Every structure is written in C-alpha cells, then in structure tokens.
Amino acid sequence: MKYTCCIFDLDGTLINTVHALNRTIDMTLAHFGCGPIDQAHTKVFVGDGYKEFVKRALIYRGDTDLTLLEEALPLYCRLFEDNCLYRIEAYQGMRELLDWVKERGMKIAVLTNKAHAQAVACIETVYGKGYFDLITGEGPGMKRKPDPQGALYTARSLGAEPGECLYLGDTNTDMRTGLAAGMDTVGVTWGFRGREELEEFHPRFIVDDPREVISILEKPEAY
C-alpha cells in the first residue's frame, strides 16, 4: 500500500470546535468591555495557534496596537481550559472514514496548533482514549504549523516515510504544512475555510465529505 498513515488536522477537520473557540474568545473580549465576534470571523481567525487567534480578535475589535494582548493571552488560556469541550462534535462521516482506515491497518494521527493538553481532551472526548495512534499539539520543542516539523515527527514516530502519508486539513496553514513535509495533501471543505483558499495551494486532492477519502484510498495508485 502506498499510504500507510493518515495525519489529520483537528479543528475544522476531525472535530467541529467552532462553538468552543467562539465562546472562549467572546468571554475574553467581554472581560475588556469589547463586543463579541461571530462564528464566521472565528473560522477565519483560527488555525495558527491561540496567540494569533487572540491577536486577530483584538485587532478586529479595535485594539490595533494590541495594548490588551499581554493580559488577554493568559486569560484566554484559563477560559479555554474550562470551555474547550463546549459543544464539540465529530463531522458527519468522519468516524466512518477513520474506522475504515484503521480496519486496513493504517496508522492515524492528529497534528494541531491547539495546545497539546486541550487537543488530547478534545480527541478523547469525541473519539475515545487510545483511538488515535498519536496526538501532537502545540508544546515545547515543537514548531507550529505550517512548519513541517510536526508532520515529519509524526511520520517518523509511526514508522512511515513522508511519501506514505496522507495529510488532511481545512486551511491554508494545513496545505502549506503537508506540502512542505512532502506528503500527499488533502484539502477538506467541510471545515473553517472554503474551496477557493485550498485551491490556491494545489493540494493533491480536495474533498467535500470524509467518505470521499475512502474512494481515494481505494484507487489502484494508492497501493
């Protein structure tokens, strides 16, 4: 089999976390007397780690000099610890894809810019403990996506070459990550960004439903 490992982004790919992210940033902004942001902006602001998310939200709400950032970052982290599981759920068809992949002996892994502890909590809440072979979130010594370090670390840890990995994500950050790691990259349209953003980076595949990935893996060239 050409592909022995599937590496998934978390937010907007494996799990719909927009309610948790939106709730936490709104609570952070409210602490400073700032108004909320809608889910559409939340989907655009996330993807590059919580620091960038908070920066973008503050700028959007008028703090263009980021005078509130130093206080806002630890506040967001504290609030997110209590709210990271708020209304999170798997995307329709994702469990079917993951079960299909696992049944065929392929490894499955998560690579996210979400803090590692929260990433593990989200994955284990939705999919159960031990379901994935490896979960890697933001932490000491691990560069954030789109740096390919995490993707290459994941492949190496699971005994796979980059060319044997299928990397799946929903944002430009993910497309740049997979491509930089030398992996066949799949853009997914059910998450936080649209097809147009994904197409700009020319991933190997773009899919509209998780179950379309099964069709990709069933093709002769996947073996």
Image (cartoon, grey):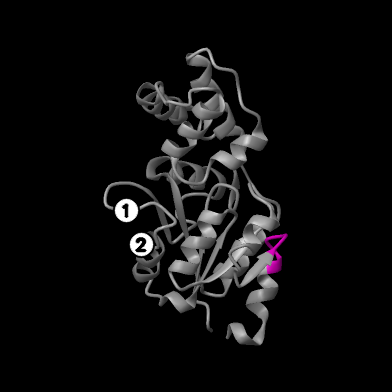
SS for callout 2: helix
SS for callout 1: loop
| Quadrant of the snapshot with the C terminus | bottom right
Q: Which residue is mark 1?
A: 142
Q: Pinpoint residue 140: horizontal percent, then vertical percent.
A: 27, 47
At horizontal 60% and vertical 48% (from top left) the residue drawn is 12
Q: Which disc number belongs to residue 172?
A: none
Asked if residue 113 shows in the view, the reply is: yes
* Magenta-colored stretch includes residue 90: no
Farthest residue in the left direction? 141
Q: Main secondary structure of the magenta part?
A: loop
Q: Which residue is mark 2?
A: 149
Q: Which sits earlier in the primary sequence, circle 1 or circle 2?
A: 1
As drawn, 161 above or below 22: below
As drawn, 133 above or below 194: below
Q: Mark 1 Cα within 10 Å, few/some/many (few <14, many 20+)?
A: some
Q: Which region shows up in magenta?
A: 207-212
* Quadrant of res 89: top right
Give the residue type that dot 2 points to: Gln
Q: Pinpoint residue 43: horizontal percent, then vertical percent.
A: 61, 41
* Quadrant of res 211: bottom right
* Quadrant of res 37: top right
Residue contact between numbered discs 1 and 2, judged by CB atoms under 8 Å: yes
The residues tagged by marks 1 and 2 sit, at their Cα atoms, a distance apart of 7 Å
Farthest residue in the front direction? 65
Give the residue type that dot 1 points to: Met
Q: Mark 2 Cα within 10 Å, few/some/many (few <14, many 20+)?
A: some
